Amino acid sequence: MWDDAFPSFLIGLREGLEAGLIVSVLVATLVRAGARSRLPQVWTGVLAAIALSMSFGAVLTFTAASLSATAQEAFGGTLSIVAVAFVTAMVFWMRRSARGFAGEIKEKVTEALAMGAGVLVLTSFLAVGREGLETALFLWTTARAANESAGPLTGAGIGLVLAAALCWGLYRRVLRINLTRFFTATGVVLIVIAAGVLGYGLRDLQEGTVLPGGTAYAFDLSGSVDAGAWYSALLQGVLNLTPAMTWLQVAGYAGYLAVVMTLFVRGVRGVREQSGAGVPARAGAGAGAGADEAVAGGKRADAPPAVPSVTPPAAPPPAAERPAARPSATEPPSAPTTATTRRRPAWLIPVAVVAVPALLAGLVVALSHPKPAAGETVAVSETDCGRGFTAPEPGRQDFLMHNTGNQTSEVYLIDPSSNAVYGEIEGLAPGTTRDLVATVAGGTYAWRCVPADGRAVTSKAVRVGGATGAHAVVPVSERDLAAPLKAYRAYVDRGLATLVTQTRKLSDDIRAGRLGTARADWLTAHRTYASLGAAYGTFEYFDQKIDGRPDGLPGGVHDRDFTGFLRIEYGLWHGEPASQLKGLAQQLAEDSAGLRKAFPHQYFDFSDLPLRAHEILENTLQFELTGDTDQGSGTGLATADANLAGTRELLVVLEPLLTTRAPRLLPTVDADIARLQKLLDSAHHGTGWTPVDRLDRTAKARLDGATGQLLEDLSPVPDLLEVRKSA
């Protein structure tokens, strides 16, 4: 979170300080001109600018959320580049203007005082609104890059609060800040951050298919760099440097940094040379003094003379020093107050300047949100599928599926040429109507209805014009899964043969009283069993006997129904004698042999195979990585390592099916597995493993995070390889 907060903190501090300095100059100028009655006009303009900025942020957030995944990438990438352009322009503008912008603002205020209330409101609105819009855009961009909003929002909030405190201190004359140096230093850091945002934006445009080269990587260190480590999180959060970057990202990052930083540094040197050549050096007159004093509302009694070249125009003397009867040179005489003016509530304009931007933002969000087209009703039955279906318009569509038949049916919107599924309803009962929402793009579409007791019926196909792009899943049949299932069953059969040998050796060790050797052989055998995780559902009652937990048993670890690996583990690591364990070890060897004999005849559900790709490590995260199953050996990470090996073996047999349906999935998962494997290896020392409860907080968090990321990336596998009746 905090690594993602720094860029937003810096932009909040800089933009907040710029806007705050402008407001301070406006207020100070009006106070010194004896025009305090005009202060509400300044605050009204500031309030309008804040409302506009927040409304702009809401439009960005909700408009992007309503787009398709590809469109979101393109939209986000485009705005990232726009944000970089704004930040770059702001950095260069402040480099040039930090020394004299207070004087410019005072001139605008003087002009506004002579032209009426509306102009003063507009002056403050435009001065603050630009900073607010830049802040909203950059904050939205950094939040999108971080994939979370808490860090960026927290960082921006802290930056804005600190900026407000600094501006108050300057206004009250309790602070002096060299603004030129401040904006120069933060400008250098912002240029580096902006280079990262540019690289991120280019990657978004590649993923949105706007720019080419999405698979042309300049480097890919994801297999050797831990993305969950603190240094990785810091580099990615602050600089947007990731373990894998394309050539376009690297070129954009390096090119922007080289060109913009060079121009910025040269410009800073040029400003210093001009300042040194045109103004004699005077003791105590630091750069930016003029701006400091202008913010404070006038020269301090103890301050040195300001540098003439950067001192803003002299402010009029305070109202207390002027004759009371003489009208102000800058404030026009007040117009007669009319009855209409008196009756207008004081809150009307402030409420209006907040309500109008919010209302406009709401209209933009409402109009841009792609609501599903009001649904056409499509009839479903065991004899007639898709009656009433006509070629829909491209976009999100809401189809009202009404079952007019006598049987419950599965309903699929498909591409009839490939059987790819765009949307589905499972178990549509007779006489009922349910919504099916799907995104339609250019292509061919048809309905397929599969009644509970009957043959599948497919509607007439319709053609939708326009560009392709709707996401579809090519269904998997039991025939498709037959080869992977056969390969995995062979893997399990070999593993069970090994398990039988290893449990017999464990039994022999305990019978002979070699408990030290038995502990090592126990871990070897238990890891073998743990690597067969995808077959647990097939093992029936053998799994409870071989690797059951004591949870829920009346006698706990001493219950007579608690047997198998975990019961023997408890005895071996709690000092139980061999005489108490030899019966348990003999029973484990017999159960293992019984399982091996029964396995070839046990039913292995086709749907279990893709489900286990996710569930093996779910159990690992729930039990092994919490220490819940540990009965004293402290080998939970060794078991987790075996579970990971079993997951890897399962993905090998599923690879042909996954590659054709989600070509980007397996490279991502492989990188996740390598990251988790590296963390597990770091806890393996010779023949020993670090117990879960002895991991330090950082190591435990990294391990949980890597496992969680792998689980997230594996989660699409069951849906991609679901056996659908549409196939």
Image (cartoon, rainbow, N blue to C red):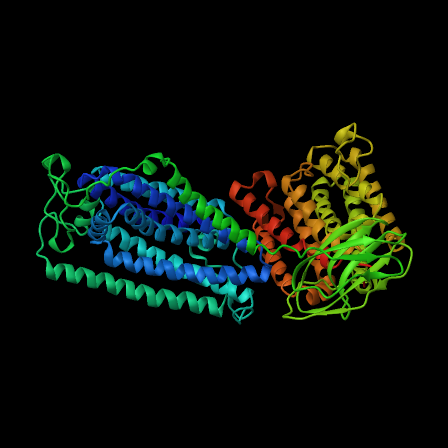
Residue at x 85%, y 49% (from the top left corner): 431
Q: Left or right of 511: which side holds 64?
A: left
Q: Left or right of 99: which side holds 540?
A: right
Q: Left or right of 708: which side holds 283?
A: left
- Dividing the picture into quadrants, the one containing residue 631 is top right
Tell me residue 421's x, y (percent): 74, 62
Tell me residue 359's x, y (percent): 48, 47
Q: Nearer the viewer, residue 282 or 36?
A: 36
Tell me residue 392's x, y (percent): 70, 64
Q: Left or right of 627: which side holds 500?
A: right
Q: Residue furthest front?
A: 339
Residue at x 81%, y 63% (from the top left corner): 727
Q: Is residue 290 visible?
A: yes
Tell me residue 402's x, y (percent): 81, 53
657 over 15 or under it: above or below: below
Residue at x 73%, y 47% (from the top left corner): 526
Q: Is residue 231 visible?
A: no
